[in-house]
């Protein structure tokens, strides 16, 4: 071993500590960078020659030690599109498109990148982009209503569904109780029937329904108890008021002529007395349950002309049967042709839907319909399962994307890119993409950001050690220089 080898060995020590200090400097500089992963330093000795009798110093080399798998602290954010992964995994992103031509869809690279920097916001084109310019990708949802997801591909998330189309009302479900002890309408002087002085008709049940254009109409169902001779029989008069200046009801359709009748639809509802076996039943159903619905509409075609026609061909009522649906279809006119609405009054022979039990008034338990008006985009929310939900002013919330989570067998071997992004390498393995919470994946934390995983106290401790080791190596160089000076002085003496 020579003094010159001591010098070169010490120089490798200086260089190694320089690299360590540079990594510490990088960590401290990015202590507040969202999604940043710290870089540690590992030291490896260089061996020139080593035997039991002799060791030739080779020095040391410094190599970066990436800590990509350790998560940083999660902190809340006021931005709903800011995301973090609670647990293991990375977001899949795309690099910014090379060029964007106005009026044309941007063309993205086929390469997928990965990041934990989830400070995403919507840009002018509706894409979710983080502060480094990376575009978040997700599985497309093929059916927004049922959240059916196509997991075979991912696409950049773009919010372009800014209008939710109206849906006409197709079904109206009613659950209500008609009191068995209610007074009767006086029919002895009819027809038409006149009110009994002691009879007070129940207030009509109203519900807003929608036509094909999203226009709202008020649907009313008026229940009456018409005849004391048939205490288990009620009538239901169904009508709606079209949004016209005259406010005329446009209800049943004469399917033979296609003309609106401008007359309400009247149905007769019969309830079980608990003893009689009604048609279609083998045993008497429980008292107070619905056993039949019949059409008793008296309609003139055209309105106001000719004798009343009791059978309205626009009403479809299935034959009653135990356990069958007590539903019927009424084709109504909202100004754009017949619109069938299915009225569901529960189940024949069961205490569901419309019933007749003891009470003091008509009691509505629930009344729902499935139509919606036109809606405009209101805001965007993301849940723990990664579904990107677009919320509209009509109350609808539809899912168009599901954000997946990527994992790697060796995440510390990912290749770093600018902007806290990574690209897979042979050593890291390929990305394993799955929905959040599946196969060990973390879940999505909305309105949250993952901070840098750098610990400042640890970095300053390592900085002190690196500084001292650097000084020690410089001392070796000073000592070797003094020894060389002594050797050179021997020649002068």
Image: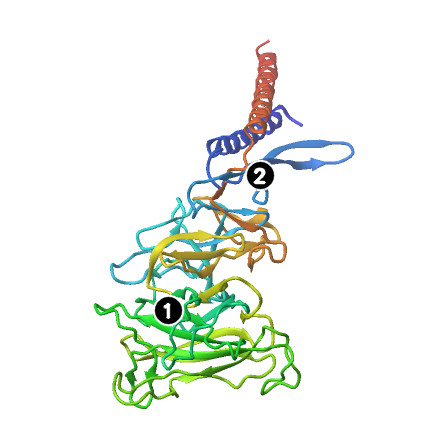
Using the rendered image of the protein, determine whether residue 365 is visible from the camera's viewpoint. Answer: no
Local crowd size for mark 2, using a 10 Å CA cut-off: few (<14), some (14–19), many (≥20) = some
Using the rendered image of the protein, determine whether residue 236 is visible from the camera's viewpoint. Answer: yes
Q: Viewed as shown, does residue 73 lie left or right of 297?
A: right
- According to the picture, the residue beneath numbered tag 2 turns out to be 63
**Label 2 – label 1 distance at C-alpha:** 76 Å
For the point 33% across and 83% down, the residue is 253
For the point 58% across and 74% down, the residue is 289
- Determine the secondary structure under disc 2: strand
Q: Nearer the viewer, residue 59 or 131?
A: 131
Q: Position of residue 68 (x, y in %)?
A: 56, 44
Which of the image's four quarters has the N terminus? top right
Against 306, residue 170 (above or below) is above
Local crowd size for mark 1, using a 10 Å CA cut-off: few (<14), some (14–19), many (≥20) = many
Q: Position of residue 359 (x, y in %)?
A: 55, 63
- Determine the secondary structure under disc 1: strand
Picture quarter containing residue 472? top right
Q: Residue 219, labelled with which disc? A: 1
């Amino acid at each position: 071993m020579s003094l010159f080898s001591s010098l070169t060995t010490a120089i490798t020590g200086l260089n190694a500590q320089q690299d360590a200090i540079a990594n510490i400097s990088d960590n401290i500089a990015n202590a507040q960078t969202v999604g940043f992963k710290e870089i540690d330093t590992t030291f490896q000795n260089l061996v020139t020659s080593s035997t039991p009798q002799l060791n030739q110093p080779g020095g040391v080399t410094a190599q970066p030690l990436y800590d990509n798998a350790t998560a940083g602290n999660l902190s809340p954010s006021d931005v709903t599109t800011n995301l973090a992964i609670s647990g293991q995994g990375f977001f899949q992103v795309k690099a910014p498109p090379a060029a964007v031509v106005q009026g044309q869809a941007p063309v993205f690279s086929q390469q997928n990148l990965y990041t934990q920097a989830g400070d995403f916001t919507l840009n002018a084109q509706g894409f979710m982009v983080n502060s480094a310019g990376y575009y978040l990708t997700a599985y497309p949802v093929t059916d927004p209503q049922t959240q059916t997801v196509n997991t075979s591909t991912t696409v950049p998330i773009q919010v372009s569904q800014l209008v939710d189309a109206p849906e006409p009302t197709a079904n109206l479900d009613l659950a209500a109780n008609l009191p068995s002890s209610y007074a009767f309408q006086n029919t002895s002087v009819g027809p038409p029937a006149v009110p009994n002085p002691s009879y007070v008709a129940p207030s009509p049940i109203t519900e807003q329904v929608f036509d094909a254009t999203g226009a709202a109409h008020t649907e009313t169902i008026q229940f009456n108890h018409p005849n004391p001779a048939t205490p288990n029989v009620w009538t239901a008069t169904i009508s709606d008021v079209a949004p016209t200046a005259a406010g005329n009801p446009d209800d049943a359709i004469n399917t033979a002529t296609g003309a609106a009748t401008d007359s309400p639809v009247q149905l007769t509802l019969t309830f079980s007395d608990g003893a009689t076996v009604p048609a279609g039943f083998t045993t008497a159903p429980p008292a107070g349950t619905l056993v039949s619905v019949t059409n008793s509409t008296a309609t003139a075609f055209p309105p106001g002309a000719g004798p009343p026609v009791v059978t309205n061909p626009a009403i479809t009522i299935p034959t009653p049967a135990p356990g069958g649906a007590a539903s019927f279809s009424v084709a109504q006119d909202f100004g754009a042709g017949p619109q069938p609405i299915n009225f569901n009054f529960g189940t024949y022979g069961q205490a569901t839907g419309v019933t007749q039990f003891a009470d003091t008034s008509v009691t509505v338990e629930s009344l729902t319909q499935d139509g919606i008006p036109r809606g405009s985009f209101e805001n965007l929310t993301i849940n723990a399962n990664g579904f990107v939900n677009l919320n509209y002013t009509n109350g609808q919330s539809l899912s168009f994307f599901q954000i997946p989570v990527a994992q790697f067998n060796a995440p510390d071997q990912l290749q770093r890119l600018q902007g806290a992004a990574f690209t897979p390498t042979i050593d890291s393995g390929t990305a394993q993409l799955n929905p959040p919470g599946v196969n060990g994946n973390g879940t999505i934390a909305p309105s949250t950001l993952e901070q840098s995983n750098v610990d400042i106290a640890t970095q300053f401790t390592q900085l002190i050690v690196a500084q001292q080791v650097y000084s020690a190596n410089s001392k070796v160089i000073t000592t070797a220089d003094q020894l060389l000076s002594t050797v050179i002085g021997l020649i002068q003496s």
